[in-house]
Image: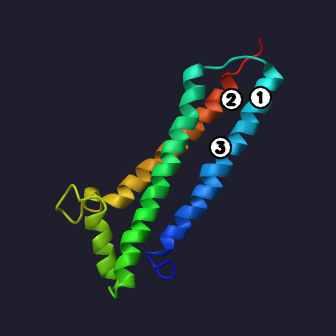
Amino acid sequence: METSWPGTWLLVAFFTWVSVGVLGPLAWSMVYSRRATERHGDGIKAVLMLHPVLFEVGVLGACVMMAAIGYVGGQVVASGGAAAVSSEAIRTNIIPPLSSDPNSVLFDMPPVVEAMFIGLALLSQLLGYLGLYTIKKE
């Protein structure tokens, strides 16, 4: 199932989780630790707490959506379906469409939800940088 599209998204989701979801927080913890020991101060607590939470929710949600797309589409291809059939199964079986208009963005919901989770992870990165620069010297 992982050897043909869209089943390869299972592997993409796994490697994304390992590289971004595990190594990313490790790097941020080292940056936060170094900045906190250099400055010995407190920053904006809400930003410092919200950053890792939003980051993990965004990365986990994006990886789960990638894995779901790979699993549902790969299952169709593995059982003999074509790529167009797997695309339709992905569009209708993971998250039902919110619009019946094929020209609407909400006609194909999995990429929309995927983009929202990626946007949440990127927003959390901006909060992380803001949190870094709010740590002041005592």
**Residue at 43% over, 53% down:** 115
Do the numbered discs 2 and 1 sit on residues whose CB atoms are within 8 Å?
A: yes
**Which residue carries the number 2 mark?**
132
Q: CA distance from mark 1 to mark 3?
A: 15 Å
**Which residue carries the number 1 mark?**
35
* Between 30 and 109, the one nearer to me in the picture: 30
Q: Position of residue 100 (x, y in %)?
A: 16, 61
**Residue at 63% over, 28% down:** 131
Q: Where residue 25 is drawn, which disc sits there?
A: 3
**Residue at 27% over, 65% down:** 93
* Residue reaching furthest to the bottom: 80
Q: Position of residue 108 (x, y in %)?
A: 29, 62
Image quadrant of residue 134? Answer: top right
Q: Amino acid at mark 2?
A: Leu
Question: Mark 1 against mark 3, which lies toward the viewer?
Answer: 3
In the visual, does 17 lie left or right of 73? right
Do the numbered discs 1 and 3 sit on residues whose CB atoms are within 8 Å?
A: no
Question: Mark 2 against mark 3, which lies toward the viewer?
Answer: 3
Q: Position of residue 86 (x, y in %)?
A: 33, 77
Q: Where residue 115 is drawn, which disc sits there?
A: none
Do the numbered discs 2 and 3 sit on residues whose CB atoms are within 8 Å?
A: no
Q: Amino acid at mark 3?
A: Pro
> Disc 2 or 1, which lies upstream in sequence?
1
